[in-house]
Amino acid sequence: MGRRLYIARSPRIAARKLGEEMLVMSGHGSTLFTLNPTATILWQAADGATPLDEIVEHRICGEFEVQPEEALRDAEALAEDLAKHGILRISEEPIAEQTRSQQPAAAPGKPMQETR
Amino acid sequence: MSALLQEMSERALRLGVPFTVQIDLTYRCNEQCVHCYLDHDDHGEMTTAEIKHLLREMAEAGVFILTFSGGEIFLRKDFFEILECARSLTFCIKLKTNAVLIREAQAARLRDLGVAAIQVSIYSHRPEVHDAITKVPGSLRRSINAIRFLKSQGLKVTIANVLMTGNMEDYNRVRELAEELGAEYTLDPTVTPMMDGDRSILELNAGESALRQLFRDEAFVGNAEQYCAPPPAADADSMRSLPCSAGHTACYISPYGEFYPCVQFPLSCGNVRQQRFIDIWRNSEQLKEVRSIRLRDLSSCSQCAHGGSCTRCPGLAFLEGNMRGPSTADCEKSFARTGIPSANLLAKKASGSAPRLVQIQLVPAITGNRLSGMGARQAL
């Protein structure tokens, strides 16, 4: 198996489910995002301890009709995009000191819509 | 407001979600601003445990943007404990403060906790003016130092100013000060009545000529000709429109747990010490009444030339005695902007009662004596 990635929600974001979408505000209120259902699942499962391939296998593939390899590629691209915006942290090691209480209700559109 | 935030706010309205809440953590204050609308005595503030419980209820209800204000929030010894709890519940946090108690350590902690924005009240670039308004010598210097600490941590800061008799010559210099500090700037041209209905502080309003000057200042309003143009007639959509977000997607909680539609709208809808937040939000008869009001229901405003474009505040109308009535302060702003009197001002003129907020006499320059002994008010 190749490298395993771990993802964790950034402790500085604000987030809330609104209807079917998850609102996420990045650090210091600079950018607001809405996440679609897939991105929301990924973001909610980002506990810093569960490898991304396991999240994809159990949470994405179980929910949507998609091939695991394709889903993992898409998930990695999405995770990197979220990380660029300071919403997620990515590491090849488990990420400690995750704020586990930051677990707002669920939710989802295009993977992500952004405004500044 | 960004387009996406506007869209989310509209979705919250459709879903009946309280998207934005302001909690005043205390009415106590270390400044005694001449224009303040609050009674600063402590009449039994919510405890730390009560506030944390309320925060959990609000997170469950879907509240996203949460503003902590006061009074002066940093006077609460449990402020950072409350803030940590709020951030663990992933609220988007905004603060309103005079910042006098913020030093490097507090600024760093606010950054670490991911506070989205901090609004700091500054009334003049001149210490003798600002400090006379706050009645605290050295307060301007300390607030400006705090803004520098906050900016050095990369935090978003907005300077909030209130236009009044004592500082009306200074608002452009305060804007320049904000630019120099890397802060945003907002100016409120209206002093509002005290929450107990006392209207004496309205004497501090800057008056019509100052408003006219402000509304033609393109640094504030953009294209002044466009901004001051006669208002378009209210169409059918305007008649169905909501007055503002108060009670629709926003509400306010006092330090004593009282639930109001807005900080400027002291209509008690319940108390979170006795009822669940969401039960008040969904079931309060007072909120249902506020939500039922449309422009077409306003006896004076629905007939007014400014009806479709007015910034009428339902809370100020309530403080004038009728939440379906006009807000004279907004009538005066519309008049100062366009030169066209509102239906309310025409009616007052016809009945011989002069509008209370218009000051056409020369306004005396600020002095310690002029300001002493009056109530105080913090910028919204």
Image (cartoon, coloured by chain):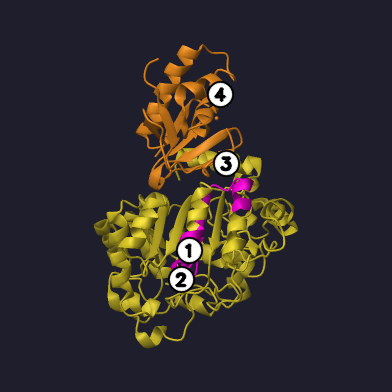
Chain colours: A orange, B yellow
The residue pinned by badge 1 equals B79
The residue under the point 52% across, 33% down is A44
- From the image, state whether disc 4 or disc 2 is nearer to you: 4
Mark 4 and mark 1, same subunit? no
The residue under the point 46% across, 32% down is A49
The residue type indicated by label 3 comes to Glu
* Furthest-left residue in this view: B180
Is B233 placed above or below A66 here?
below
For marks 3 and 1, the one nearer the N-term is 3
Q: Which residues are magenta?
A: B56-82
Q: Which numbered dot is residue B75?
A: 2
- From the image, state whether disc 4 or disc 1 is nearer to you: 4
Please provide percent x and percent y for residue A110.
49, 25
The answer to whether residue A65 is visible is yes
Q: Which numbered dot is residue A59?
A: 4
- From the image, state whether disc 2 or disc 3 is nearer to you: 2
| Separation of marks 4 and 1 at Cα, in angstroms | 38 Å
The chain letter for the residue carrying disc 1 is B
Mark 3 and mark 1, same subunit? yes
The answer to whether residue B185 is visible is no
| Separation of marks 2 and 3 at Cα, in angstroms | 35 Å
The answer to which image quadrant residue B98 occupies is bottom left
The residue pinned by badge 3 equals B10
Neighbor class of circle 4 (other Cα within 10 Å; few <14, some 14-19, many 20+) is: some
The residue type indicated by label 2 comes to Leu
